[in-house]
Structure formats: C-alpha cells, structure tokens
Amino acid sequence: MTKAPKFRSQAWFGGTSKDAFMHRSWMKNQGMPADAFDGRPVIGICNTWSELTPCNAHLRDLAERVKRGVYEAGGFPVEFPVMSLGESNMRPTAMLFRNLASMDVEESIRANPMDGVVLLVGCDKTTPALVMGAASCDLPTIVLSGGPMLNGYYRGEQLGSGTAVWRYSEEVKAGRMAVDDFMAAEAAMSRSAGSCMTMGTASTMASMVEALGISLPQNAATPAVDSRRNTLAQLTGRRIVEMVHEDQKLSKILTRTAFENAIRTNGAIGGSTNAVLHLIAIARRIGVELTLDDWDRFGRDVPTIVDLQPSGRFLMEEFYYAGGLPVVMRALAEHGLLDKDAITVTGRTVWENVADAQNFNTEVIREFDNPLADQGGIAVLRGNLAPSGAVLKPSAATPHLMTHRGRAVVFETIEDYKRRIMDPDLEIDETSVMVLKNCGPRGYPGMAEVGNMGLPPKVLAKGITDMVRISDARMSGTAYGTVVLHVAPEAAAGGTLALVHEGDMIELDVPGRRLHLDVDEAELERRRAKWTPPEAPESGYQSLYVSTVLQADQGADFGFLGGKRGAGIPRNSH
C-alpha cells in the first residue's frame, strides 16, 4: 500500500514531540477536536476583511462559506487576517502599502502550519497584494473575490462607482450641477456590499485572476450580494482541498501563457491601467518574465467587446447577467487570441472552462465584428519624455486627441495643481497639455491615483470634457480620458518629466506609440544640471519604500522581493 503523503502542516501538528504538543494544545483552546490534527490538509483562509475597507466588509461571511466547503472536502480551515487596503479611505494612497501587505501575506503563510491557501480579496490593491505574497510562497492557492456591488441608481440614471464621481464633480465645476444634487447622489452610488461595479481596478483584477486561471469561473462578475457568490465561496473551499492533494501549486498555473491570456483579456474587457503594474509585479514574484512591451505586443490588436463604464455604458451587474468573463474568454479563444490549453485551478484547461459559455446580451458583451474599440488593451508609449515607457487606455480616451501637439501647462505637485486649476487667469485652453510631476512611486510616495486631473472650469464651460493629461501618477480604473500615466522614469527619479517647463510643446502619437517633448537635448542637459531631487523621508516605512521601490515599468514592487522563496519548513520556535 502506498503511504499517504505527509503534508507541510504535519511538521507542526504531527508526532509526539514537545513542539507538536505545544502547537496542538494551544490550538485546542478554540475547541478543536484531536482528529483535526490527524494529517488532513490545513487550509489557510487569508482574509482582508475590514470595516475601513468598505469593499471588503462582507468577507467574514464569505469566509464562513469557504470553511463549509473545506470541511466538506475533508480539510481543516483556519482563517487569518492580513493588512487590508481600502482605496477609498487610505492616504496618501493604498498603493503605498501594496508591497507591505504582500510581505504580510508571504510571511504569514510561510510561518504558519498550512498546506493550501484561499485568498479573500476585493478592493483594488488587496488582490495583487495577496497574489504577490502567495506567489512568493508557491503553495496550492486559489483566489475568491468579494464581488461587485449592485448598480447605483440616482433619479432614474445608473451610477457607476467612481465614474459618476468624476463626471458629476466636473459638472459642478462647470456650473451645470448644484452641490446639493451632487451630495444627494452620494448614497445612491454605493448601495450594497461589494466593490466598484464599473470596470475599475477591483473588477479588472477580479477578471485578471479568473483569466490567469487562479479562481473558479464567474469569480469576476457574480455580484457580492447574489446567493451564487456564496455558492462560489463554498465550491472554492472544496476545490482548495483537492488542489492540496494534487499538489497543484501556483507556479503550475501562473505560467507565461497564463499572463499572455490575461493581457488579452484585459484588452477585451477595457480593463484598468493599474493591471499593468500588478501583473508585472505578480509575474516577477512567481519568476515569469513579463515586460511593459508585452502589454502592447499581446493587447494591441484585441478589440474591446465589453461595453462597461468607464469606457462604455453598462455595469458589472449587466455583465454577469450577460454571461460574465467566460463569454469573453470563449470569444477570444475562438478568434485565436487565447491559449486554450492553459491549466487552471479547476484542474481543467481554460477552454474546458469556457467552451459552453453563452452570451445572453450582445449589447453588453458585443460581437467581435461590432466592438466598442477596435484596438483595446493598453497603449505603451515611448520617447524622450518616457524613455522607459508610459501607458494610456485607448478605450477610455477621446479619438481626436490620440494624435495631438500642445503647449505644456505644468503642475509641480498635486497641491500646485489644486491651488491653480480654478484660477480664471490660468493660461490654459483645450489644446493645452496638462503635465503633473512628482506623483510617481518615489515622488508621492506610492503613485497615487491623481493622474486624471480635472479640467479647469473655463474649459469645462465651453462644453469640453477631455484634454491630454500626462503624469507619473496612476488613475483610478473607474476614470476616463486621454490620460498618459506611469511615465518612467518618474520626475522624482530624475526622469525627463522633471525637466518639462511651462510652455514647452509636447507631442502625443498613440498610433505611433510616441510621447515626445519638443526640446533639444542640449537644453534638456542644461535643465538636468540645475535639477535637484526632492527630499526623501528619513525614517519609517516611507523611507524603506522610497529607497527600494522599482519604477512603474517594473511593477513598482520592492527590488528585494523578486522571485519565489517557497514555503519550506521554518526552524522550531521553542
């Protein structure tokens, strides 16, 4: 008879040693029976629940559903908390803490007796942070997202999370909407548990984990309050136990092919630019080479077929009812844009997961010959203004601005922008190019979502709703516009962006993938000689962050966190 494999957790709980006694005895103060430690798979449920992270405030309930599934499959579930990252509340930006949270996840997994992990995620940065940390350990792992909230409604109009905020705030600045009406929309936008119901970063990253194959099908779109989200949680609990028995580690699923599939899927859904940073960082952790140019190479010719805000009309609720992400992935596969043989956490291939998906609403999920944008994906721009690259989301941009030359109006910091933008004497019009500096990984620090700068009132008053905007910042996935982001190297690192002066001419050529500052090299060298870097924090976490964070084109991870370190058995604690 073949002896059953000994799971990792038995290094803690197995045997009759003093150490095993200690590990089991203290766990038993929670009322756990002796046979809980008999060698069955121990499943860690890594939970980002927090009342300060509204999008994740319902995850305790989902965790109970996961536990039910783990027990049904013969496992032993143990729930543990990790740092939660709430985009709507954290300052200066949740992105400042993504890498820190990933370290929390990695070390919590490695230090504790678990054989497999369920990652409970929701709000934007919780998904990449947990996947990054888990990738560094490489245990059998499955992701469960909290799901999007129900559609917002205000006075007969659908409200999309975030997208409505940007639009209404511009209407107020233009004098077309009363402040009282703006305030009245507040409660109407967020009216159920769940994350943003637009194709913002939360929904994008939920789609990315499904496209990568590290969640069960329909993870991306099932609404948070739909009973089928609870069903998905229970099935996730069952499946992770099977994955431990199969030794199906993350590295077996997160292959180069899986990332290529995800990039193409991001183009088809009109996903957030933030996915660029996060997937590059995840790939770096698992040991897969993925570059900024890969995003352009694999996503450039993918049409955007999902008609969701901020690029389109609908919201995640309609996307789910139309068939969800499996419909999109089936369409991509049928048009030769997806590797059908990529393996997933189901134990089946991508194609086996999506082959029977049906489209129930071709307005929401369009046919390939009737796309929302012919070339979706993420445009990667280069030139003397962005030698290491910058990104733009074509599906959310204004077509006539995709090729543009204009005079730079420069804001040295976000505070400078806020101080000057309302000034009626500001020398700016719709042909200008708004430039924002010092908002990148080092400069802010943390690369805040401030790149989608609101337009000046005197331009809005003309009925203009978009201008070319350039920065080393990020923008919310719920935002829109002809916004060039993630300029690298950033201003605080001495990139060319730091040298832009008011009145310089800038050329944007998205079809040609070019971003050019029309200033000769000799003048740039003179400016560079006079430039001084901003003061860096001298102590605390921000000091560590600024001194070790990589640039946007490398995923803005910490340099020392690259590669997977595994989850070997640590030395005894007593």
Image: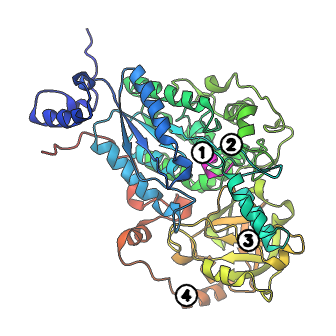
Question: Can residue 479 be seen here?
Answer: no
Question: Which amino acid type is marked by label 4?
Answer: Trp
Q: Is residue 100 above or below residue 142?
A: below
Question: How far is disc 3 from disc 1 in space, using C-alphas?
Answer: 27 Å
Front residue of this view, candidates 400 and 338: 400
Say which residue appears at 41% left-offset and 43% top-offset.
Answer: 134
Kindly state the secondary structure of the residue where label 4 is placed.
Answer: loop
Relative to 212, 535 lies left or right: left
Relative to 22, 262 lies left or right: right
Question: How far is disc 4 from disc 2 in space, using C-alphas?
Answer: 49 Å
Q: Which residue is mark 4?
A: 531
Question: Which amino acid type is marked by label 2?
Answer: Leu
Q: Quadrant of residue 35?
A: top left
Q: Is residue 17 magenta?
A: no
Magenta residues, as a range?
Answer: 199-205
- Which sits earlier in the primary sequence, circle 3 or circle 1? 1
Q: Which residue is mark 1?
A: 194
- Which sits earlier in the primary sequence, circle 2 or circle 3? 2
Say which residue appears at 44% left-offset and 57% top-offset.
Answer: 99
Q: Quadrant of residue 460?
A: bottom right
| Tag shown at residue 150 | 2
Residue 537 x, y percent position in the rendering: 41, 77
Question: Which amino acid type is marked by label 1?
Answer: Gly
